Image: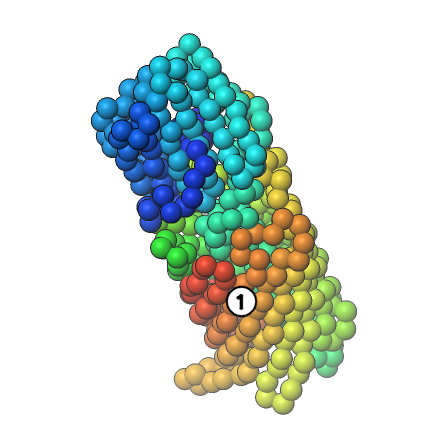
Amino acid sequence: MRFGYRLFTGLALSAFAACSYAQITCNTIYGLSNSINNGAQSGQICAKTAQEFIDLTNTSGLQSVTPSYTNTSQFTAQGLFNSVLIGLSSPAGSPTLTFNVPALGITQSFTGATRDDSQSQLGDFLKTNNVVGQIMKLQAQTSPTSPISGQGGLIPTMISNQFNQNFTEQATNIASPASVAKQASSAGKTPNLIGFGAGYTSLKFKDIDASAISIPLSYTIRNDIDPRRQLSFSLPITVVDMDGAKAYNGALGVSYRVPMNDNWTLTPNAQYGFVGSVDLATVAAAYSASLTSTYIIPKSGYEIVIGNMLGLVKTQKFKSGDYSFSPDISNTVMRNGIMFTQPVSTGGKKMSLEYSLIDTRYLGGDKPFADNSQELGVSIGTNKSAFAARSFVRGGFTYINAKDSKGYRLSVGYWF
């Protein structure tokens, strides 16, 4: 498998001895500082992707910054692999390679007939032991750029999609008792909804710029007797570009909205998602379950919407051929929001303007590096009543704030 080969070869070649971050001066996701023959020569390599890093850390790559390096040279190397310090060293004239990950307490030596054989043994070790999974878990806990738990990553995307689908997207689908009786009896068969959207997110992680393009897809089946009862299927797809390194994630979800009274609904939701990135040497699957409460407080000329969600997310073991690993990440998450919505008229067309504030907090389990985030948004769109036979559209802007990451999101959605 090409992905597995790159991932394990990259970790084998880019694993370098423990040191302080100060010795790596690269403003990129990957960095390497190596020394040969007891400091007689040293050099540094910076790279934006795992494959670029792999290409620079083979014999010819090391020789490009330390020309006197050979396969019999004494060397120690220290590097940064997605914020995880890992290392490799070898004594002069010896094929033995010593691999370590200080933060995980892992130190292992390999002795083959040649250093190439020793590297092969290290690759086998990484296949059969869950070191890669442990490294991905450590990345999630120590790096804002983790493709699993960082902003734009798999877990935050799954959490926000579950909540937003029942809060910012269709919260005001709850109608008053009078309109429920009147419209439900006269409207006949209520059409189902196909949802299509597009979003662009721009993020800044200290010295690293990132962006994400998302395409949320959905299909909602509305009950003919009470259209507030809705069975929804969702498939958001996201492509993240992290300073040139690409990651892809998506999740298939299902939810069922249950009206508890005229202003309050509860929505259980389940999702299964996947993230893969050769550039960031990451692959993981995850499943989640959540319960969202949406409560609308009608006022004269406006409405206040309160949303609360409690969710559980857990990564799943990934296996392909000889490769098997799991980040073993589990999170308990709460996402709460308040939204102010009011009718407006633009060019004689009735629309609604919405302002929202959403707070996300990881309460338990394996907390990510950014264990809380805040989103301040504004959107405008056409009618989205549960009883509307016509389509509706909505567009908005959201400011995002989290630990060591800030940014904004532009989004538009169309339901028909």
When the figure is inspected, residue 339 is found, relative to residue 362, above or below; the finding is below
Q: Which of 176 and 100 is in front in this view?
A: 100
When the figure is inspected, residue 360 is found, relative to residue 235, above or below; the finding is below
Spot occupied by residue 273 in the image (x, y as percentages of width and height): 57, 45
Q: Which of 216 and 148 is in front in this view?
A: 148
Residue sitting at the far right: 260
Left or right of residue 134: residue 241:
left
Spot occupied by residue 67 in the image (x, y as percentages of width and height): 22, 26
The residue at the point 55 percent across, 48 percent down is 141
Spot occupied by residue 182 in the image (x, y as percentages of width and height): 71, 78
Callout 1 amino acid: Gln
Spot occupied by residue 283 in the image (x, y as percentages of width and height): 51, 38
The residue at the point 65 percent across, 47 percent down is 330
The residue at the point 31 percent across, 25 percent down is 37
Q: In the rendered image, which residue does mark 1 sit on?
A: 374
Q: Can residue 101 be seen in this view?
A: yes
Q: Residues within 10 Å of mark 1 (few under 14, many from 20)?
A: many
Secondary structure, mark 1, is strand
Residue sitting at the far top: 113
- Say which quarter of the image contains residue 16: top left
Q: Is residue 236 visible?
A: no
